[in-house]
Amino acid sequence: MNVPRWALLFTFALAAPIFAPVCCAQADFSLHATPVAPAAPDPAIAGALQTIKPADIEKTIQALVGFGTRNTLSSMETDLPAGQGITAAADWIAGQFEAISKECGGCLEVHRDTFTETASERIPQPTTITNVYAILRGADPVQAKRMVLVTGHYDSRVTNVLDAQTRAPGANDDASGVAVSLECARALSKLHLPATVVFVAVAGEEQGLNGSSHLAKLAHSEGWQLEAVLNNDIVGGNTTPGDTLQLKDRVRVFSEGVPVAATPEQARRIRALGEENDSPSRELARAIADTGRTYFPAATGAPFSTFLVGRPDRYGRGGDHTSFNREGFAAVRFTEWREDFNHQHQNIVMPPAGSSDPILGDLIQFVDFNYVANVARLNAATLATLASAPGQPVKLTMVTKKLDNGSTLQWDAPAGAAANVHYELLWRETTAPDWQYMQTVTPQAGAGPITVTVPISKDNVVFGVRAVDAAGHRGLVQVP
Ligand SMILES: [Zn+2]
């Protein structure tokens, strides 16, 4: 059909007002609402963050690189030179935790979770795998049951994942993550946190998440009340010369949307309520961003922010947080802004002089220790905040007995919560990425559930509730 151009213009001119906003009056959900603002820093936590030094991170990565290869399969090699291979690396990490523990009067319990992985595609023969971890028990007998965990993988690889002999420095992937775990232990062991913190270095990541899978199953079978798992993998800040798109003032945090461990009934509820963006892991990611706004730049003098990515991991890649997600735990992944794939999973190749070819290999020269220190500070701040905060509200429900345009939420206090715990009712538009508004809820003295009613339609926003202690430590948000 031939339509003259003037006719099209005329039609558009008539149609345009229909799509223009009809009003600009303020919506009920933003009326008299307080925008969410960062909490005030806790001086003790801020002080602990200042003890995290790039020089210590450099020493850790240097030591790990010094084991030649940390390929998981090297635990079965009998002809490696003395002091080389993954078993020597495991001993060294355990020694570091022991040394940190000595400094705090034996405050850490150092453990090895050693097991034999049966043969599979990337494991040609039954192979000994060891996770090394240290537990800083909570100082409060009731809160000590609650746990938060930080991990990195100490195994490494070259181009051929089955090669257990060739030098595999794994400086960024993932000595950087192990350095974060060790620095968190060093910094937080000086605090008396109410809940328990676990510092982990796992193996077997490159062969198929074997170490983390074993530890997550152990945590599940032993009934660990794990509220948060922070996985740091490739947090070296990649300093490849000439990369103008690298950003050193932020770290990516990946989190799953619909939990991989959701039962069909839970998945049905998530679909019905539109809670695809509110998994426990996603709330953990938001809590990390929130904590970051409290301590950066206040505790470090430099800006550093969290870039939330609403997917479990990068395209076609995996990581140890997934093992914890599979066991039903909230777990996220920290990764630098822009990876350089010439420096991951590669044999070391030095191009001849004068060549414009890139250097290949995961070498320490491409790691930015200042960047890793900021990632470690963000992890430590999050662990300390969550371990200081009360637990999560219990049996949080949206009361929907009758149809109305208000919203009533009800919950019980977290187990063992102090009498002076208060709550923050949070909400955001359903398309907003992070919490926008809040209202403080101070519970009435006495037993019974806590109830709050607001003149805001539950159909138009997402509500969440978090518990906050008297000092202002914010717990994880729960959605009804
Ligand atoms: Zn990795």
Image (cartoon, rainbow, N blue to C red):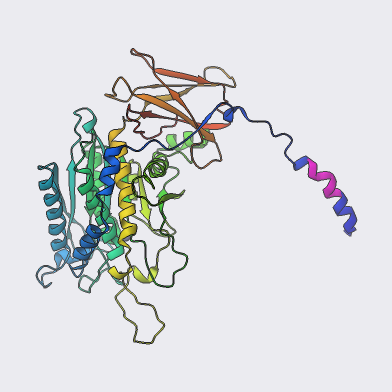
Q: Main secondary structure of the magenta part?
A: helix
Q: Nearer the viewer, residue 104 or 362?
A: 104
Left/right of residue 17 with respect to residue 336 in the rendered view: right
Percent across and percent down for residue 409 are 46, 22
Percent across and percent down for residue 282 are 42, 42
Q: Nearer the viewer, residue 182 or 153?
A: 182
Q: Which residues are magenta?
A: 11-17
At horizontal 22% and vertical 27% (from top left) the residue drawn is: 142
**Vertical order, 21 against 450 (above or below):** below
Query: Any magenta on residue 15?
Result: yes
Left/right of residue 426 with respect to residue 358 in the rendered view: right
At horizontal 42% and vertical 46% (from top left) the residue drawn is: 256
Q: Residue furthest front?
A: 301
Asked whether residue 54 is in view, the answer is yes
**Vertical order, 245 against 397 (above or below):** below
Quarter of the image holding residue 288? top left
Ligand 1 occupies quarter: bottom left
At horizontal 41% and vertical 41% (from top left) the residue drawn is: 290
